[in-house]
Image (cartoon, rainbow, N blue to C red):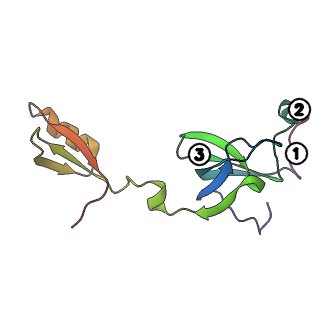
Amino acid sequence: MSRSFPLRLGCAYSFHYPRHNYLGLPTTVETRRIVVEEIRDTSSQPLDSQTIAINPLLRRGRWLVTGHDLERDAIRSFYFDSMSEVRRLSDEQCDPFRRAVYVVMTALGQAIFQGSHLDEALNFLLKRPTGIVCRVVGRSN
């Protein structure tokens, strides 16, 4: 891999990518977010001819980036040449729930428990006749 290639393994990125990355089709783009797991230089590691024959109109490029798609929770591959507005994501942008708290609420909306782990909230709820477990992403102090 070239030292000047802008993406790094293990890092998360947001970018715009064509919904249908085929030659001759209109290019409607959508925002994608991935954690990069593999970067393949197709000039030194070419795709096999069967792969190319299956999708001959696919718009390809030199760099094939594979990673965990954060929206679809699946491994997906993207051609770097078709990416636009690429930007690196912070840890908070990758996992906005990392600092979440769990709250058990009564039916009247009163918070009766707060903890940092789901299992704590569920254990508390098991000892009560009713309640609702909520995950709070942000809170003001």
Q: Nearer the viewer, mark 2 or mark 1?
A: 2
Q: What stretch is highlighted in magenta?
A: 43-49
The image quadrant that residue 58 belongs to is: top right
Residue topped by disc 1: 46
Residue in the image at 8% along x and 30% along y: 129
Which amino acid type corresponds to the residue marked 1 in the rendered image?
Pro
Tag 2 near tag 1, CB within 8 Å: no
Compared to residue 86, the image places residue 67 above or below, namely: above
- Measuring from the top left, give residue 22's x and y in whole percent: 79, 41
Query: What is the CA distance from the residue labelled 3 to the residue labelled 2?
Result: 26 Å
For label 2, the crowd category at 10 Å Cα-Cα, with few meaning under 14, some 14 to 19 and many 20 or more, is few
Task: Inspect this view and state whether residue 84 appears.
Answer: yes
Residue under label 3:
68
Q: Is residue 10 visible in this depiction of the protein? A: no
Judge left or right: residue 17 versus residue 117. Answer: right
Q: What residue type is labelled 2?
A: Ala
